[in-house]
Image (cartoon, rainbow, N blue to C red):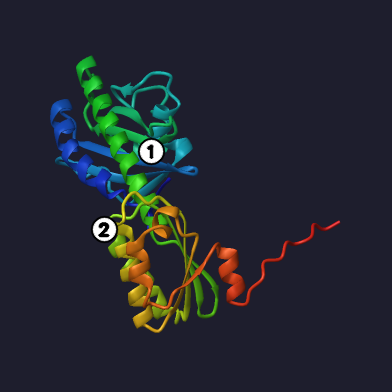
Amino acid sequence: MISKVNDKTVYQSLVVTSTKLFALLTKNLDVNSAYIAKKVGNKMTVINSYNKVEFIIPNDIAVDYQESNCKLVLENNEPAKTVMNLMADEETKKRKITDELGVKAFIGVPLNRTDGSNFGTLCLMDKDEKTFTNEQVEMVQSIADVLSYIIELDDLYEDIDLLSVPIIPISKGIAILALQGNVNDKRERKILEDTLNYTLSHKISSFLIDLSEMQISNYEFSDALNRLVSALKLMGVKVMLSGIPTALASSTRMRDQFQDLEVTFVRSIEGGLKKLGYQIVEREEEQ
């Protein structure tokens, strides 16, 4: 029924923010415990929990969705699900989770992303019976709106982190760094650090850096690119640049910076791979 979770995604901003709000919620509603659960497949995984006095909900558990109280929240037609006594309610009194947790009062609201997709639930519980007022329900819903926004930010930060340094291995000693979007100071440091670490750990001798998906809004990127290429050259790596944006191609500043770095410029990734001795061949469809 209840199982331990050894590996789960941690929403850092969500955890920090919700912990502070849990204290406010449990005090206002006069309940002991609050938690956020994320729906992962057929499980509800607790992302963060808060227990004011008595320890009821830990952080490292997962519950079968079909048996969870969260199912009542997510499949409820109302904006919030409230139960005065889970042990007496016809819908919940025979659930194993009710007996295992030993709680009575319950209130839960869904946590949704801005696109309408569901993330999970925000729930509060207590071992005593309670009737929640409209003002208390509205407060929980308002807090859920705030937490939903934090979830969006955490998802965005995770996506940025994954896309920030997309290194594609080609073969032994050869890799492609396909940069996208904009590069600020923080991302520049990550690109430099991750690329150099990858170069050392994988013994890279040739790097093809593709810029065709970059959004160049200023010329400071040429300085960042110069620092990256210079560091790679000092490590003995051959560097090739492809897909140079017009803003950089027409920059005298960039030409001056790269004049002495012995960098090869190509029009596309395909052109770069051909220079490295590779040829892209379309596979014929099987008959």
User: Relative to 134, is 154 above or below?
Assistant: below
Asked if one can make out residue 183 in the rendered structure from this viewpoint, the answer is yes
Q: Is residue 265 left or right of residue 259?
A: right
Inspect the image, locate mark 1, and give the three-letter code of the amino acid beneath it: Ile
Q: Is residue 93 left or right of residue 126?
A: right
Asked if one can make out residue 190 in the rendered structure from this viewpoint, the answer is no
Q: Which mark is residue 186?
A: 2
Q: Is residue 281 left or right of residue 21?
A: right
Q: Residue 225 in the image: state x and y as whole percent.
A: 35, 65
User: Relative to 141, is 147 above or below?
Assistant: below
Q: Residue furthest bottom?
A: 236
Q: Residue furthest right?
A: 287
Residue visible at 42% across and 78% down? 262
Residue visible at 32% across and 45% down? 154
Q: Which residue is mark 1?
A: 97
Q: Quadrant of the N terminus?
A: top left
Q: Residue 89 in the image: state x and y as whole percent.
A: 36, 22
- Which quarter of the picture shows residue 142? top left
Q: Quadrant of the C terminus?
A: bottom right
Residue visible at 60% across and 65% down? 270
